[in-house]
Each structure stands twice: as C-alpha cells, then as structure tokens.
Image: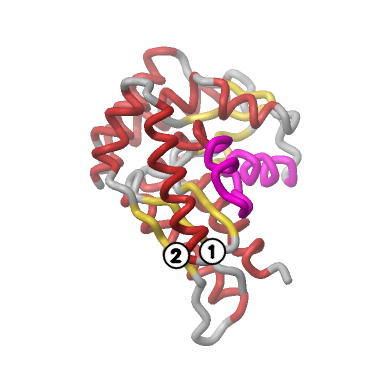
Amino acid sequence: MKTIGLIGGMSWESTQTYYRLINQKIRSQLGGLHSAKVILNSLDFAEIEPLQRNGDWQATAKILCSAAQSLQSAGVDFLLICTNTMHKVAPQIEHSVQIPLLHIADATAKALQKDSITRVGLLGTKFTMEQDFYRDRLQQHGLEVVIPGAKQREQIHSVIFEELCQGITTSSSKAAYQEIIRDLGEQGAEAVILGCTEIGLLLQQSDTDLALYDTTEIHSEQAVQMALIT
C-alpha cells in the first residue's frame, strides 16, 4: 500500500471527511483491520483565506509548496490537495516536488466521463466557478461547464465561507442550493459537480433529482485506487 499525503485544513471540516472516506474505502477493499497509510499536513485556514480574498496566490502557493515538500520528505508516495480552490496553485506545487499530485478536477472529469456526462453544472467558491484554472481543466477533458448567475455565485460563496467552513449547516442554505441546482438543470446540465469539498456537508444525492458528483468522495476514491496499485 502506498502512503497518501494530504494537504488539508482548508477547511478542516472537509479534511476530516477525506480521512474518514479514505480509511473506510481501504477497509472495504482489504477488509479486517486494514487502514490507510496517510500523512496529513493540516494548515491554518485563517492564514490562507485573506490571501485568497486579496488575490495573493503567490503567497498561498508558497505555503502549500512548503507543505507538499514536507510531505515528500516524510515519505509519502503521492499528494492530494484537500480543497478545490487551492488547485489554483496546483502547477506550482507539482513543480516543487518529485512525487505525483492527484488533481481533483482530473479525478472528477474521469468520474463524469465514465457516466457519459458531457454538460455539467459547477458549484464552488467564486474562485472555482469564475476563474479559468478549474473550468479549463474540465474542458480539457471534453466537458461543457455551466455556472450559476452572478447573484447565485455570491450566495454559494457566502454559504461556504460563513457557514460550511465553520461547521454550520442550515435548511435555508440547503433550499437555496437546491434552487440553484434546479436552475442549472434547466440550463441543460446533466449533472452538478459539488466543486467545493464542504458542499457535501450540506447536500446529499437525496436532496435533488439531478446527479451530484461530490469531489471529496471522488478524490478519496481515486486516492485509494492509486494507493493500492502495485
């Protein structure tokens, strides 16, 4: 079994989901007392969020590259960034180490392609929905990406940072997300990517008729597959 390196803490609410899912999937695959070989570098999100907000991606890259290098030194075989938004600096992280990075957008695209999805809605932070680094990566896999309108993007972003990253879930926010998903379906989306690792704390498949692709679940599943490849 390979050792998985997790760059987490952004937020820790979703990082704990990664740890749980990865271990559950390893136990499901191998049985008995098996658990995953994981090394976690958990960052302080309060130091990173203002840099995101101010667009200082160079500073965020420096922090995450340092985390990646520490995990490489600790002996992990490959890396996961436990957040969609910080894949903005994935290229810098990849160049800073000599071990593979399992990119969350690639993992998600692979899952969508397996199900023959070609037009997909995207929910996430404003950075993820509005900037090219994530949508372009999906489009490189042949996917057409639909994003919510400007007011809806503001609402999605606000719920993520003011509620979900702080462990808060409300019925009103769930209802708002459900309405946004219905709108994406009316725009022709065949499925919706939960493109923020916290959204799965609020929404489950039973909350909507449109297929949901939870990036935390998908990323964890493919990490386990990668860890067990001999």
* Disc number placed over residue 103 in the picture, else none: none
Please determine whether, in this image, residue 39 is positioned above or below residue 152: below
Q: Which residue is mark 1?
A: 76
Residue at 62% in and 66% down: 227
| Separation of residues labelled 1 and 2 (CA atoms) | 7 Å
Q: Quick one: label 1, few (<14), some, or many (20+) residues within 10 Å?
A: many
| Residue 212 visible in the snapshot | yes
Contact check, label 1 and label 2, Cβ < 8 Å: yes
Query: Please, what is the three-letter code of the amino acid marked with disc 1?
Result: Val
Q: Position of residue 145 (x, y in %)?
A: 62, 24
Dot 2: within a 10 Å radius of its alpha carbon, few (fewer than 14), some, or many (20 or more) residues? some
The quadrant of the image that shows the N terminus is: bottom right
For the question of whether residue 203 can be seen, the reply is no
Q: Secondary structure at mark 2?
A: strand
Q: Identify which residue, 46 or 143, lies in the foreground.
A: 46
Give the mark nearer the N terminus: 1 vs 2. Answer: 2
Q: Which residue is mark 2?
A: 39
Q: In the image as oriented, which residue stretches furthest toward the bottom?
A: 32
**Count of numbered labels shown in the rendering:** 2
Q: Give the residues in magenta.
A: 90-114
Residue at image position (61%, 54%) is: 99
- Relative placement, left or right, of 45 versus 68 is left
Q: Out of 131 and 150, give the one closest to the viewer.
A: 131
Q: Which is the main secondary structure of the residues drawn in magenta? A: helix
